[in-house]
Amino acid sequence: MLLAHAGQMEKLRFGVIGFGGMAEALAQRLQQFDDATVVAAADTNPDRKVAADALHATFYTDYEQMLRQEELDAVVIGTPCGLHLEPTLAAAQAGLHIFLEKPMEISVERCDRMNRAAQEAGVKLMVGQVLRLFPLFQKSLDILASGEIGKPRAIAATRFGYAPIFHSGWRVKKELAGGMLLETNVHELDYMRAVMGEPKQVYARTLNLLGKMEYEDVAYLVIEFQNGGIGDLEASLSAAVGEYRVHIICEGGAIAHGGFGGTLRWARFGEEPQVVTVEEAQQQYPDPYTRELRSFVDWVLHDQPPLFTGWDGRQAVAMCEAAYLSHERGVPVAVP
Ligand SMILES: NC(=O)c1ccc[n+]([C@@H]2O[C@H](COP(=O)([O-])OP(=O)(O)OC[C@H]3O[C@@H](n4cnc5c(N)ncnc54)[C@H](O)[C@@H]3O)[C@@H](O)[C@H]2O)c1
């Protein structure tokens, strides 16, 4: 419906559902675009009106009222993960394109309903699997795409830290946050999939060490990919000493990087590693959140191929779901 008159459209009009910290950061970026604007925001917490006022967006405490009253083309959904389904179905029914924060939802069944609703309504749905776009991650994907070190065969990602933000509010609850793998490591799992291709099965062991959340705070996963490659994820929100690192082993060389900081080193067998600092990579790859939103707007307005879609969001959730089932059953589980 929208694309039919996209040629005359001056700006893509966004409404935001769940106007918390992340959605506000996204809305601030959208307000900088020439071809997009945030006209309204809805949050059940009335205190969020102040933030909406700062962006000159009309504030609602009921998103359904916003969908009825505002003339919108698209929504950004930034509610807690377990509250992504209902607003997505409502937005699709209203014929609006949908940008969803990660993780897509707390189960594959719910993700499939959302993708189906978007498809049936003929609207575009993107899940912001933004980690791939962070400078050192993007650099690694570009090195792989250049073919200089051959095909990736194994990937290991470690994300250890201590995160008291998870000890209160909605992040404590399994039905809202899904779990540590969903709320946090869905990022690393999506990146591992961007490197290795579609996953086949997962073996996982998890612990709830501190008991602060209704779910795991330590998880170790071994992933088998459809191309025969292997992946290893080690994650914790209860590690008093933190560390972030990624290692990708390829047929002709390897890449190692520090994730959000430090350096990326890469080499072919027998050669000295080339080193890229995060500062250098930032010059090449600007703000990842702006890039994902730019891709969404260009997809909606100009049908340009998106950086990622609802399928990517669904597959990352599917890897988490397989991991949780594997932990329960004590055996590897096929990715649904
Ligand atoms: N991509 C990233 O780097 C990144 C970073 C942080 C958070 N996130 C994701 O963003 C989402 C939100 O996280 P956050 O940190 O912004 O949390 P937040 O608590 O700051 O925001 C969530 C907001 O949703 C509102 N809300 C809850 N139920 C609602 C409802 N039914 N209708 C309307 N509003 C409702 C809350 O009042 C709150 O303002 C999560 O899915 C999280 O995983 C992504």
Image (spheres, grey):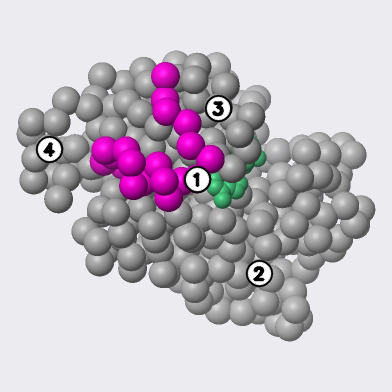
Location of mark 1 (residue):
62
Mark 4 and mark 3 residues within 8 Å of each other at the beta carbon: no
Rounded to the nearest angstrom, the CA distance separating label 2 from label 3 is 39 Å
Mark 1: is the Cβ under 8 angstroms from ligand 1?
Answer: yes
Tag shown at residue 229: none
Across and down, in percent, residue 87 comes to 45, 54
Provide the residue designation for mark 4: 6
In primary-sequence order, the first of circles 2 and 3 is 3
Q: Which mark is residue 49?
A: 3
Is disc 2 placed on a helix, strand or loop?
Answer: helix
Residues rendered magenta in the picture? 56-75
The residue drawn where x is 50% and y is 45% is 62
Circle number at residue 323 = 2
* Residue 97 located left or right of residue 83: left
Give neighbour class at mark 3: few <14, some 14-19, many 20+ (Cα, 10 Å): some
Q: The disc labelled 4 sits on which kind of residue?
A: Ala
Q: Position of residue 7 (x, y in %)?
A: 7, 34
Between 205 and 58, which is closer to the camera in this rendering? 58
Quadrant hosting ligand 1: top right
Q: Nearer the viewer, mark 4 or mark 3?
A: 3
